[in-house]
């Protein structure tokens, strides 16, 4: 197991943004009868989600979160030397969305800006990259911007995914300071399972065509989607997660020398309640330390870990806190991070409509 260790780098502030439009999952009945909808919603535990409108992209959510963070913390934009934008729903195929955000946020042209294209484990990937660059370079401040509009890539006619995914964006400010102490990241990938969660069409292997854009029945239950909409092999994903994630958490704790009882909060990717409850029970984790947001925001892919921190730990990170972050999904990829938080300032969540934050 490769274990990345950082010292004296941490998150000093965070802010989040969600679309204004609230989806009541029990009323999401355009394509399925109400009794079937209730059965699915009760099972997955997602009662509300946020859907971006046609004019709102992932970058808009990240922009709103970043502007809130900068304003609330009186940040000098000229001191932001690094901007990482993480998403699998970027604005364009090219240019990189990070470059657009660098200009939109009024950051200097000396700011390093690049995209990372990762799924559910992506925030922890991006955070590790930011920590590494901050620790080993002469950088003052870094912005990690993580945004997803997953509602735009899953079919509302496919019952297996129609009630799960939502949209959100988060900004995290990373700085160097000895007060943070050590953080550890175990980062893993298994491309042999790349087809468990996938969008097959619309890339350069299978370019967009009439055929890839046409919805079709995909199983004996009448579920429909096009090749440019996402799918999951849920049973295989579940088996993968329950096998790999508890083992990786245990290995990371052992390698870092951190006792699980000393962890203040454990933040899981919000895949579904059943998976996270299973892991907690299997590892005998204290459920009082495990915040969750899936019931009100759904699965927001890579944003789910930082969004859960912003939403549920807003007033709980004063002083020194140690968080265990566990994220897993598309790839397949998975990360366990043990991260030090010290007096992290978390802003109120902003709502976005028509690409703009609502005052």
Image (cartoon, rainbow, N blue to C red):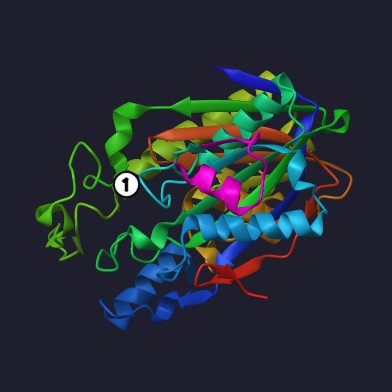
The 10 Å Cα crowd at callout 1, few under 14, some 14 to 19, many 20 or more, is few
Of residues 130 and 6, the one nearer the viewer is: 130
- How many numbered circles are shown? 1
Q: Residue at x 14, y 60 (%)?
A: 214
Q: Position of residue 195 (x, y in %)?
A: 27, 38
In the rendered image, residue 321 lying in the magenta stretch gets the answer no
Residue 37, position as x, y percentages in the image: 34, 75
Q: Nearer the viewer, residue 291 or 4?
A: 4
Tell me the quarter of the picture where residue 241 sits.
top left
Q: Which residue in the protein does label 1 denote?
A: 235
Q: Is residue 353 left or right of residue 128?
A: left
* Residue occupying the point 31% across, 32% down: 193
Q: Is residue 105 magenta?
A: yes
- Say which quadrant the C terminus sits in: bottom right
Horizontal side, residue 219 vs residue 282: left or right: left
Residue beneath the point at 64% across and 36% down? 111
For image coordinates 66% across by 19% down, the residue present is 255
The magenta-colored residue range is 96-114
Q: Does 196 sit above or below residue 171?
A: above
Query: Which is nearer the eye, 297 or 176?
Result: 176
- As drawn, 330 above or below 53: above
Residue 67 screen position, x and y as percent: 68, 58
State the image coordinates of residue 274 (x, y, percent, origin top left).
48, 54
Q: From this viewpoint, is residue 189 visible?
A: yes
Q: Is residue 313 visible?
A: no
Depth order, front residue of 261/119: 119
């Amino acid at each position: 197991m490769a274990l990345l260790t950082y010292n004296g780098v941490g998150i000093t502030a965070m802010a989040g943004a969600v679309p204004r439009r609230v989806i009541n999952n029990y009323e999401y009945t355009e394509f399925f009868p109400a009794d079937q909808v209730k059965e699915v919603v009760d099972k997955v535990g997602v009662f509300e989600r946020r859907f971006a409108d046609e004019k709102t992209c992932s970058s808009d959510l990240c922009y709103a979160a970043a502007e809130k963070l900068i304003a609330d913390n009186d940040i000098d934009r000229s001191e932001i030397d690094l901007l990482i934008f993480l998403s699998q729903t970027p604005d364009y195929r090219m240019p990189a969305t990070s470059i657009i955000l660098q200009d939109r946020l009024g950051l200097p042209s000396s700011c390093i800006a690049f995209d990372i294209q990762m799924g559910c484990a992506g925030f922890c990937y991006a955070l590790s990259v930011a920590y590494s660059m901050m620790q080993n370079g002469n950088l003052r401040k870094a912005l990690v911007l993580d945004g997803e509009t997953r509602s735009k890539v899953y079919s509302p006619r496919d019952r297996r995914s129609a009630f799960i995914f939502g949209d959100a964006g988060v900004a995290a400010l990373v700085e160097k300071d000895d007060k943070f102490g050590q953080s550890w990241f175990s980062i893993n990938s298994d491309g042999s399972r790349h087809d468990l969660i996938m969008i097959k069409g619309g890339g350069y292997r299978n370019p967009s065509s009439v055929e890839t854009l046409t919805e079709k029945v995909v199983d004996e239950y009448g579920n429909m989607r096009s090749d440019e909409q996402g799918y999951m092999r849920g049973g295989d994903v579940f088996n993968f997660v329950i096998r790999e994630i508890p083992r990786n958490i245990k290995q990371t704790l052992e390698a870092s020398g951190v006792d699980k009882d000393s962890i203040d909060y454990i933040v899981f990717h919000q895949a579904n309640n059943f998976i996270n409850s299973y892991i907690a029970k299997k590892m005998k984790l204290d459920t009082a330390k495990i915040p969750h947001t899936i019931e009100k925001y759904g699965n927001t892919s890579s944003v789910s870990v930082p969004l859960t921190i912003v939403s549920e730990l807003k007033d709980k990170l004063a002083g020194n806190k140690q968080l265990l972050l566990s994220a897993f999904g598309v790839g397949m990829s998975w990360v366990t991070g043990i991260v030090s938080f010290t007096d992290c300032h978390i802003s109120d969540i902003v709502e976005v409509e028509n690409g703009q934050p609502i005052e």
